[in-house]
Amino acid sequence: MEEKKLRSQEWFGRKGKDGFIYRAWMKNQGFPNHLFEGKPVIGICNTFSELTPCNAHFRDLADAVKRGVWEAGGFPLEFPVMSLGECTIKPTAMLFRNLASMDVEESIRANPLDGVILMCGCDKTTPSLVMGAASVNIPTMVLSGGPMLAGRFKGKKIGTSDLWRFVEEFKKGELSQEEFIAAESAMARSIGHCAPMGTASTMAAMVESLGLALPDNATIPAADSRRKAMAHMAGINIVEMVRSDRKMSDILTRKSFENAIMVNAALGGSTNFIIHLLAIAGRMGIELSIEDFDRFSADIPLIANVQPSGEHFVEDLFYAGGLPAVMKEISGKLHLDTLTVNGKTIGENIQKAVCYDRELIGTLEKPFKPESGIAVLKGNLCPNGAVLKPSACTPSLLQHRGQAVVFEDIDDYKSRIDDPNLDVTADSVLVLKNVGPKGYPGMPEVGNMQIPFRLLSQGVKDMVRISDGRMSGTGYGTVVLHISPEAAIGGNLALVQNGDWIHLDVQNRSLTLEVGDEELAERRLGFKPLDLGYARGYANMFIQHVTQAHEGVDFDFLKGGSGPEVKRDSH
Ligand code: FES
Ligand code: MG
């Protein structure tokens, strides 16, 4: 096979003035001349940041990648991109996912890179990097930072999902202030991203099942030496990918997206998976609809016994055989011929996988829960869809009729949810408006509203809650999310009033506001669009261009890709 000319040679291989300029300043880092003479240049796209604690170990990990790149005869060059720390960034990291993706896309295209390793960890750092890289489409692979070790508190293993329980226990006085702080110190005790199958691990599993990462990428703990060994192997692998010209478009096909949906169901992965996968498909020009998530996950039960849908942690899943062992259990349903970064098919990658612990990894015949995946609901409240994660729900609430208790926005909710006079019963349906893509803006993870304190102290553990927002991947409960169209643009959600009857029927995939069309039309006359108060800047652009939840919440002008070419030189 004749070797394709390296993209980086458009910079470094030039004669005369241009080549001089492209090479001379690079040499101030001590790189000798031969590195510029045709070695594959590998970008290490690093989301290291001390403000993104889940990715704070990425300097070390990048060094391991470099060792692999050098070993394989490549030339590694590390560069930073916008890093989104889920728990720190206001108003929500999701507001900036698309911005970070633009940083990644332009950084890759504008620079002399032949291949890229995307270093991803905390929730949004995976989709933003994959989306950006997809719009360039050069050989690319993902290296995830790995999950944290589970914490220990009062003799029990804990992780992010326990946070919700600690907060409730603290409110009820069952945890003292001192114990609350001790729990906080015990939870995130090691490097890595959240320990349960929250959004970060859901994303790491997504890239592995899509074929964009090496086998075991999703589960090796961050603190395990094998994570660094994997980083080293990723460095070797990306150089080979460049030599074989294996691009993202060779790996990301309609079939690989279907695989990812099935695997996510087997894991009980986060609902955030939906909007991120839709956005990535949009960048690749692959048709994927919200209905596909229901269709392809419908007959996949919960195979992995991992929080929040199960009991254990991603760390434990690794010891039990990792994602390949989970995928092997549903291999009869997967497309086994999809290509992956290492040049092998998914089928080849999982062939030798072994389950070491049936407590962690069930089978199709003996799953942990029969219902998993994503239920996509339709109805007059959500003509373009809403989603719910059956494995996180209370089974008795999957079929429920109740009266709405409405919160007009997040401030209204916060000021009244614990009001002892709030007119609410365990059968009520909590409705939160204006937390969608445009309404908040940025579609924050507030959909799993807390149970009103009065009911909580009576022992109520779950209620039907509906909104146009998202929920943390570690959250649980009978929570309807991603209602589209959202309230802020006049979706029927905006018209719900206190006392309206709402009918949730998961079996039949419907969510209905039991108010007649005429009455709704009348209420609509009184609808006023929100003044969000963002007259300028990025948030203004976000509100102008963001698409709805069922379309992936990407910007309308970012769909598709522009390829790797840059026509003009810089001088
Ligand atoms: Fe970063 Fe959970 S906060 S992964
Ligand atoms: Mg999150």
Image (cartoon, rainbow, N blue to C red):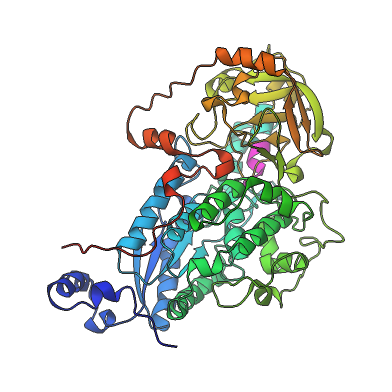
The reply to whether residue 146 is visible in this rendering is yes
Say whether residue 164 is magenta. Answer: yes
Q: Which residues are magenta?
A: 160-165
Left or right side of 244 for 469: right
Q: Which sits in the foreground, 523 or 356?
A: 523
Left or right side of 405 for 35: left
Q: Quadrant of residue 171?
A: top right
Q: Answer above or below: position of 558 versus 439.
A: below
Q: Quadrant of the C terminus?
A: bottom left
Give the image location of residue 67, x and y in percent: 41, 77
Q: Answer above or below: position of 330 versus 444.
A: below
Q: Quadrant of the N terminus?
A: bottom left
Kindly report the secondary structure that dominates the magenta region of the rendered protein: helix
The residue furthest right is: 365
Q: Residue at x 57, y 30 (%)?
A: 486
Q: Answer above or below: position of 369 versus 428.
A: below
Give the image location of residue 18, x and y in percent: 16, 71
Q: Residue at x 73, y 57 (%)?
A: 266
Q: Residue at x 64, y 15 (%)?
A: 419
Give the image location of residue 169, x and y in percent: 69, 32
Give the image location of residue 437, x and y in percent: 51, 35
